[in-house]
Image (cartoon, helix red, strand yellow):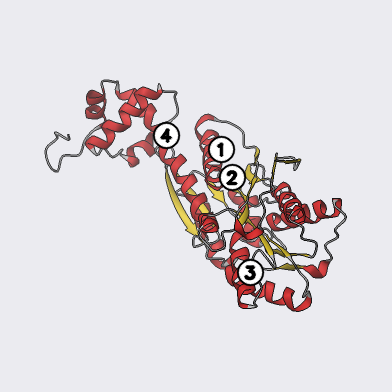
Amino acid sequence: MRSLKPGHAATIREVAKRAGVSVTTVSHALSGKRTVAEQTRVRVLEVIAELEYRPNVAASSLRTGLSNAMALIVPDIANPFFAELARGVEDEAQKRGWSVFLCNTSLQPEREADYVARCLAGGVDGVIYCATYVESSHVARLRDEVSRRLPVVVCDERIDGMIGGVFSDNYGGGRLAAKHLLAAGRQHLVVIGGPSDLPTARERVAGFCAAAADEGVIIPDECITWTDYRMDAGAAAIADLLHAHHDLDGVFAADDLLAIGAMRQLASAGRTVPDDVAVCGFDDVNLASLVSPSLTSVRQRIHDLGAEAATMMLSHVLDGEPLSETVLPVELVIRESTGTSVGWTCDSGGEVDIH
């Protein structure tokens, strides 16, 4: 129980005394700059919680020259993918006593440009960037100006000229989806891609088409629709594809929101999922298991994407580790929307194994 007087702000010395360690050990446990035994670190954090200790950020900044804060720029926090990714960033940052400033662009280029300018003005020690657009003046500014002053770790979408980044095996995931739909006996396949200028969308669609071609099924351009990662966009896309291709029996959507929108539109059009049309999404957000029928999806390690990006940032700033590229593997999660139990897993090179 907290034994300090009401209104008294706990000091680092009081934390050290209660935990039975030195002030230096408390400091290292908070900053992560030096290794502290896990049992000791946990004890220090428990005492910090008990005493409601709050580090003096201003004093720490004067000593280290760091604000112990990073900015996370995301396109749309309403998208469950980015909500989970942000949680991964924050969970990892919190372990090392850092704050995360969430910058939600709401898919607005001018808003994203404003956040980039704010990062350039200072107040953070690094930027984790999930692109809304990969080719724009503010992305160029992020690459050419911000990254010269602050470390920038790109996450999810690759950006030419940026070194540090954490990504998923999007190409391999597209291959998984194609193999699965073909194994389910679907031959008339259509694709709802994301925005055509985003690497994630292009890689997923490329992997899907390549794996289908390996099995002798060619996906013509007119069977591929490019659109935003939104539920209503998925509905509109499948409506157009149904009109042009009455015999379609399999759909690959480049993210789960697109897939769920497509399933709703298929139901409105009198097509049953999966009996008439099998649908596979990408991401495996929590919503995928809650819709009816539940959605088969290529699972990204979304929380890990954020956590790995934060770890890379912290290791670079605090430990001098160089920025690098990390690619996380994906897997297929089979549910009701494809009506089959045949599936695959793949490694980061896109190699596929049946199970």
Reply above or below: 164 against 211. above
The single residue placed furthest to the right in the displayed view is 216
**233 sits to left or right of 351:** left
Q: Position of residue 47 (x, y in %)?
A: 26, 31
Disc 2 packing (10 Å; few <14; some 14–19; many ≥20):
many
* Tag shown at residue 153: 2
Residue to which mark 3 is pinned: 262
In front: label 4 or label 1: 1
First of labels 2, 3 by sequence position: 2
First of labels 4, 2 by sequence position: 4
Assess whether mark 1 and mark 3 are in contact (beta carbons under 8 angstroms): no
Assess whether mark 2 and mark 4 are in contact (beta carbons under 8 angstroms): no
Q: Which residue is nearer to you in this view: 353 or 172?
A: 353
State the CA–CA distance, disc 1 to disc 2.
8 Å
The secondary element bearing badge 4 is classed as helix
Residue to which mark 4 is pinned: 64
Amino acid, disc 3: Ala
Question: What residue is rendered at 22% in x and 25% in y?
Answer: 18
Assess whether mark 3 and mark 2 are in contact (beta carbons under 8 angstroms): no
Question: What residue is rendered at 66% in x and 49% in y?
Answer: 341
Residue to which mark 1 is pinned: 312
Q: Position of residue 28 (x, y in %)?
A: 39, 27
First of labels 3, 1 by sequence position: 3
Question: What residue is rendered at 56% in x and 30% in y?
Answer: 320
